[in-house]
Image (cartoon, rainbow, N blue to C red):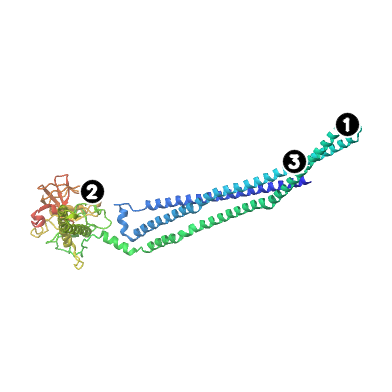
Amino acid sequence: MMEERMGDCWSYTKDQFDNLEKHTQSGIEFVERYTKFVKERSEIEINYAKQIRNLSKKYQPKKNSREEEENKYTSCRAFLSTLNELNDYAGQHEVIAENLTSQIIAELSRYLTELKAERKSHFHDGRKAQQHIESSWKQLEASKRRFERDCKEADRAQQYFERMDADINVTKADVEKARQQAQMRHQMAADSKTEYSNFLTKFNQEQNEHYHTLIPNIFQKLQEMEERRIERVGMSMKTYAEVDREVLPIVGKCLDGMTKAAESIEPKTDSKQVVESYKSGFEPPGEVEFEDYGPGQSMKRTVSETSLSNSRGEAKERPSGGKSKGKLWPFIKNKNKLSLKLGSGPEDFSHLPPEQRRKKLQAKIDDFNKDIQKEMDQKDALTKMKGVYEKNPQMGDPASVDPRLVEIAMNIEKIQSEVQKFEGWLAEVEGRLPSKSDPPRRQSGLYETQNSNSTTVGNNCAQDRESPDGSYTEEQSSETQVKVAIANTPEFDDEFDDGDEETLPTIGTCKAIYQFEGHNEGTISVTEGELLYVIEEDKGDGWTRVRRNEEEEGYVPTSYVEVFLEPNAKGAMTYI
């Protein structure tokens, strides 16, 4: 019965260890699974932040592009601010990934290593205690069987001695031998009894210690280990939430920045920027004068140079005492003029409308003044350094500063000459710009017959017109009747095609006083001293249209040539 009872106890203890071993292994696997979950979340945050940064970078304005030029508008600046805030927003997701890695993944990985080692140690102690108690039980059983065997052997030896002693036929020596054998067996049984008693006492003590001290301590350690594991997982889950909460204030600031950027958009300011960017500075036309076509009046036709209905056969009379300015009508594509793109063209920006040219020239002057100020600051610093060297020769040679001072002085002189040049162009533009207080003027031309008074200035001059596509032509009064007849034909409206345009007549000659390289569309290259034919004079935009031969013509800067108009075309006026 005792053996069965002890076997049940050992089996129960072994089963408990097996159950605890399975449970603790399951706990370790849970920690590993949670660590993997956080690691995947961290990778998601990194990839998300990377995609957000790429998105922000993709829509950043490119340098020297139209998008960068549009940043002057509040809506574009608001979008740029949103992109910058979005970049900071992506940085907060990188912070989340970094904190998840350092505060949870790394900590749990290190803790898992410690947990596995501790669990292994506890179960090793449990198996060792179980093996020790089983070994003690086996020793007790062996001593008990030995004691039982020795007792039986002693009883048999005693019975044998008694039979020998009672038998009269047995010699005295045999009886003595049997007596000694019985005494020896009794001594062995006594020794076995003592040994069994000692093993029993020892086993009871070890068993008591095993079931009341060792095993409970091991179970207690396993329980504490498991509780620490659960607590550690709970702390990691709390940290998981805190990592997100820590970045919320900065994320909120990013969102507030986006909201503030959106609220900073000012439609009226943007529309004013557009007006300022594309304001031409041309003078608006005045009122159209009434012309009488009653009986007895010669047939005349007044056409404004700003009229949208100008036809190929119509001409305009320039008012005496000034030059008419060509107008670029809104929504009409200008094919023959130079491109008006900002930032391209000659150095003096003469390809731009007056107002845009003024702004560009002023901006260049401001840049030059900044460069002059930088050079002056360097000059002052070097002058002070030279003074220090003169007072303390051991610190340096004063003469070593002179080359740099000479270089700066030359740079300042060069920049100042550029400033004077641009200021001259600016004064020219500001002198041409109309004042807001000036009344509007309407410039018109008359179609007259060949019998009109030829002494009136402009009656027989080259008549110019502006077509709806923005091109300019000039025609002599001798062809007026023919052109009027053409204008009244049904096919007249189809003559706006550039391919059917007639060759313009010459209205004078010019001489190139400077060399000009015509790289832009619509220009023509000229060399210094070259003689050319003038087919369209300057209309206020700084360009004169010339012809070299029947097939080669284009625009040149008016300031680069000396123009001689025919007497009947411009009253023999010559200008440079």
Q: Are marks 3 and 2 in contact (CB under 8 Å)?
A: no
- Mark earlier in primary sequence (3, 1): 3
Residue mark closest to the camera, 1 vs 2: 1
On the question of residue 326 being in view, the answer is no
> Dot 2 corresponds to which residue?
498
Residue 262 in sight? yes
Name the residue located 62 percent from the left edge and 46 percent from the top edge: 124
Q: Nearer the viewer, residue 203 or 471?
A: 203
Neighbourhood count class around disc 1 (C-alpha, 10 Å): few under 14, some 14–19, many 20 upward: few
Q: Circles 1 and 2: CB distance less than 8 Å?
A: no
Would you name the residue on which mark 3 appears? 142
Query: Front-most of 120 and 282?
Result: 120
Residue at the far right in the pictured view: 168
Between discs 3 and 2, the one toward the N terminus: 3
Q: In the rendered view of the protein, which quadrant contains the C terminus? A: bottom left
Disc 1 designates what residue? 171
Give residue 155's mark: none
Cα gap from disc 1 to disc 2, whole angstroms: 163 Å
Residue 157 coordinates in the image, percent (x, y) = 84, 37
Q: Mark 3: which secondary structure? A: helix
Residue ranking furthest to the bottom:
437
Give coordinates of residue 462: x percent, y percent: 13, 54
- In the rendered image, residue 136, in percent from the top left (x then y), is placed at 70, 44
Amino acid under label 3? Ala
Q: Amino acid at mark 1?
A: Thr
Earlier residue among tags 1 and 2: 1
Taking the image as shown, residue 242 lies to the left or right of residue 505, namely: right
